[in-house]
Amino acid sequence: MTRRRHIFLGIALAATASLTLAGCAGGGNDAGDDAPASSGDEYGLVEAGSLTICSDIPYAPFEFEGGDNGTGYTGFDIDLLDAIAKKLDLKLAVQDVGFDALQSGTTLASGTCDLGASAMTITDERKANLDFSDPYYDSLQSLLVRTDSGIESIDDLDGKIVGVQQGTTGESYAAEKAPGAELLQLPSDGELWPAIQAGTIDAILQDQPVNLEHEKADSTYKIVEEYNTDEQYGFAFAKGEKQALLEAVNSALQELRDSGEYDTIYDTYFTAN
């Protein structure tokens, strides 16, 4: 082969390599600029290129239907994880699941999603079956009642039916502090709110931001007490299986705090509180 043919062959090979790389970068994905820059193979993701989260929806203001991020859902948890996903060059995907199986570790152990994000309080009991990210939200419990109920505090709940979400710290708090009440365990706030409106229950004891949403939406209801339970929310991971992803999420969360982007997302949902 002559030197001239070597030169032409080198040019052809370089052009072919460039086209191949361009094809790989496009990957046949119609998402354009929204396509993830990374497959995230190092994180052992359920779906390459996507951060798949499981959440019990609705639980406003943390997660509810709406938004424009392409998942069909929004809220503080969702928006924060969308920002984290972008830091990791991943797209966000959301699956709606039951809270009890999520907080017990069953859902995550099955490999349904990469992490759980559902306003989940970090507790020692849950840490036996789950790994948690650094805390991302400090929460209170609260008691919501009708304004004409005559209930002014947790001491007035004897003989009353109190709605709680099954498997939550609100349920545990009500069982401990209101032993004379009848607790009605329901799967989520999606059932609790209609139950108090229908008169099936006399009160809801659950996270303060969620009850606050109901108070703001309907003046027939009010929060009569708040309880400082020193709770902090964390993102949950299958026990011992997602260490690289957990560390990456923690790092991205810290970057968002340092840059002020966390505060911007927080203020979207909580400044009115």
Image (cartoon, rainbow, N blue to C red):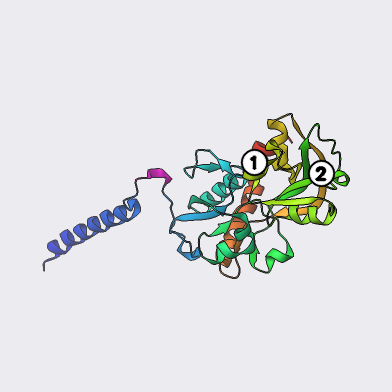
The residue that label 1 is drawn on is 61
Q: Residue furthest left?
A: 1
Contact between labelled residues 1 and 2, with CB atoms less than 8 Å apart: no
Quadrant in which the N terminus appears = bottom left
State left or right for residue 212 relative to residue 6: right
Q: Position of residue 93 (x, y in %)?
A: 49, 51
Which dot marks residue 218?
Answer: none
Instruction: Please tell me whether residue 39 belongs to the stretch shown in magenta.
Output: no
From the viewer's side, name the closer residue of 208 and 155. Answer: 155
Quadrant in which the C terminus appears = top right
Determine whether the residue tagged by mark 1 lies in a helix, strand or loop. loop
From the viewer's side, name the closer residue of 18 and 207. Answer: 207
Q: Position of residue 117 (x, y in %)?
A: 60, 53
What is the spatial separation of the Cα atoms under label 2 and label 1, in whole angstroms?
17 Å
From the viewer's side, name the closer residue of 2 and 157. Answer: 157
Taking the image as drawn, is residue 271 in sight? no
Task: Give the mark nearest the N terminus, 2 or 1.
Answer: 1
Taking the image as drawn, is residue 82 in sight? yes
- What amino acid type should be assigned to the residue bearing mark 2? Glu
**Stretch of the chain drawn in magenta:** 30-34
Q: Residue furthest right?
A: 155
The residue that label 2 is drawn on is 226
Residue at image point 55% right, 67% down: 109
State left or right for residue 125 relative to residue 94: right
Q: Residue furthest top?
A: 219
